Image (tube, helix red, strand yellow):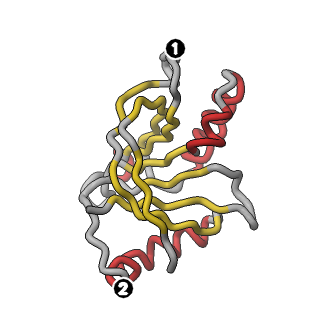
Amino acid sequence: MNYKIEVLDDCNVVFVRNKGKYGSNKNYEMMMKFKEWIKANNYWRYVETNGILGVALDDPKIVEEESCRYDLVLKIDEDVKINDFINSRSFVGGKYIVFAIPHTTKDVKDFYSNLPNILDNNRLKVKSEPILERYKEELGKDKCCEILIPVF
């Protein structure tokens, strides 16, 4: 499987968070609400430039599913008013290998199922940090998402 290498810079981001099972409808609904907020506040140019990052912060093998945290993150280069929905924090960048895959539930699930083999076959040394999913397009047959794996 082909990949590219990308370095993400440290930056300030806005984010929204859900707690619960990864892949749930709540995460999808949170994405739709986040996109509405982005559009309503005229920040869509940041989605086009940087994409929205999905960050699974917890390992469901260690943390109970209902406590697993999933953040949607957007790099924004301006001050944003924080509220009950939108938060801000610093994002620590780093070196990533980036895989582009079709943005369907099946393809994303298949990618993660095959990830150990992909890493072994490419002799990649992975950092113990969250894997990122980057979305620049909507869900659909000919759309793609990118999976960013932190590496040394």
Point out the frontmost of discs 1 and 2: 2
Amino acid type of the residue tagged 2 in the rendering:
Asn
- Image position, residue 140 (x, y; %): 73, 61
**On screen, residue 120 above or below 32:** below
- Image position, residue 36 (x, y; %): 69, 31
Locate residue 97: give its quadrant. bottom left
First of labels 1, 2 by sequence position:
1
Circle number at residue 144: none
Secondary element at tag 1: loop
Point 41% across, 75% down: residue: 115
Point 39% across, 57% down: residue: 131
Amino acid type of the residue tagged 1 in the rendering:
Lys
Q: How many marks?
A: 2
Q: Are marks 1 and 2 in contact (CB under 8 Å)?
A: no
Viewer-closest of 146 and 28: 146
Secondary element at tag 2: helix
Relative placement, left or right, of 147 versus 10 is: right
Instruction: From the image, tell me which residue sits under label 1.
Output: 81
Instruction: From the image, tell me which residue sits under label 2.
Output: 121
Neighbourhood count class around disc 2 (C-alpha, 10 Å): few under 14, some 14–19, many 20 upward: few
- Image position, residue 60 (x, y; %): 33, 58
